[in-house]
Amino acid sequence: MVEDSAAELQHPRRNLANRYRSQAEKFVKLARKDPERRNENMAWAEQNAQQALLHDFTDERNWLTLVHVKRSRDDRDGIHRCLEDLFIVLGRDPDRLQELSQIDMLTHGHGLMSASLTEDPLHAEEWWERMTSKEAIEDFAQRCRRLDFRDQRANIIFGRRMQKLRENGMVDLFLELSQHLLAHRPSNHELWLEMGRLHEQRSEFDDAWLCYDHVQILRPHLLERDKLLERLTKRMDDKIEWVPPAENIRDKFLRRMEDLAKVVGKQESLDEEIPDDEINVENQEQVRLESLLELGNSEEAFFLARRLLSGGEEWAREYMDKASKMFK
């Protein structure tokens, strides 16, 4: 406990968030004491509460403080936006977002925020304490398979939860669900590296190579794919030579990541027909890549371009680089 407290004090962003939250609470008290300067003090309270949440979105007190300030300022729309933002952090569940439109935010907004954080704690340790049955774990897994993790904060929160699965021996489930995180945030090279090492420990060398290959694409100076080949060359018997995954295996893997990266609700315009005089495979894929990038689906475009490049379509490199810059 002492070590945890010390670590928290040494965390610069968290410590700064605590200071901003304290300042927000101070201005709320000043607003109560001095009615003539209430509006000015509440404006300062809101500004500090926003900074607290910006510096540490994992502290539930920062969310509740901001909603409290907005309720004090009769800001229904502001409370609504706070709850929408929280649901984005919790994985963008469309059903839960739609429920907000029928709620009186001044009356129920703070309670709804508090209940949401109790039901779905932001701290991984508190969340894990709620995972007391196989049914709870399966419900979590099903949820991960349909949620949108493109928001970096959601990616962090659910990444920490998935780490709890791994720490408690659920490695297969960790590996499966991590692919959903990576499909929506391909730039997370640390998680790709971790998955590669796990697969290598399990002697799943093709899977390890695919993960290390992705690390090396994102960070060319990290020669993880080449290092794996060196390690395997030294380990293998002279009569056995391991070779990197065949093109069909790489294609299957990248198609799966491409499918996982699809964004619900943004596919309609991708189904438009290409004029008859322009029908050929390269042109169809190029039109699709351009449409994906135009719609902001950089993750799906990235995996599509990678798949094409892996199959020898060098022209797709330009689109892979464009997609990479977008999601970075």
Image: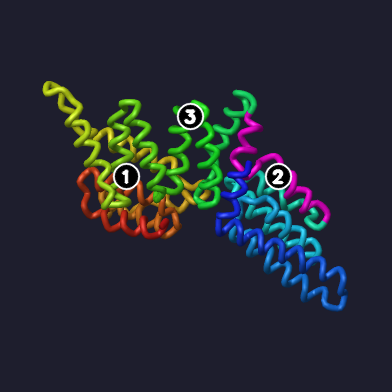
Decide which of 235, 314 is in the foreground and name it. Answer: 235
Name the image quarter holding the C terminus.
bottom left
Callout 1–callout 3 Cβ contact below 8 Å:
no
Residue lying at 38% horizontally and 37% vertically, measured from the top left: 195
Vertical placement of 19 versus 268: above or below?
Answer: below
Q: In this view, does 33 lie to the left or right of 122?
A: right
Where residue 38 appears, as percent x and y from the top left, is 82, 73
Vertical placement of 1 versus 138: above or below?
Answer: below
Residue lying at 74% horizontally and 72% vertically, measured from the top left: 43
3D distance between C-alphas at marks 1 and 3 = 21 Å
Task: Give the residue furthest to the left.
Answer: 238
Decide which of 94, 166 is in the foreground and name it. Answer: 166
Where residue 277 appears, as percent x and y from the top left, is 27, 54
Residue denoted by label 2: 116
Where residue 66 appears, as percent x and y from the top left, is 71, 60
What is the secondary structure assignment of the residue under circle 2? helix
Vertical placement of 226 versus 289: above or below?
Answer: above
Of pointers 2 and 1, the one earlier in the residue sequence = 2
Is the stretch drawn in magenta largely helix, strand or loop? helix
Q: What stretch is highlighted in magenta?
A: 107-131
Q: In this view, does 147 lie to the left or right of 203?
A: right
Q: Which circle marks residue 173 in the picture?
A: 3
What is the secondary structure assignment of the residue under circle 3? helix
Residue 317 makes an appearance in the image: yes
Callout 2–callout 3 Cβ contact below 8 Å:
no
Task: Give the residue furthest to the bottom.
Answer: 36
Of pointers 1 and 3, the one earlier in the residue sequence = 3
Instruction: Name the kind of residue labelled 1 in the image.
Output: His
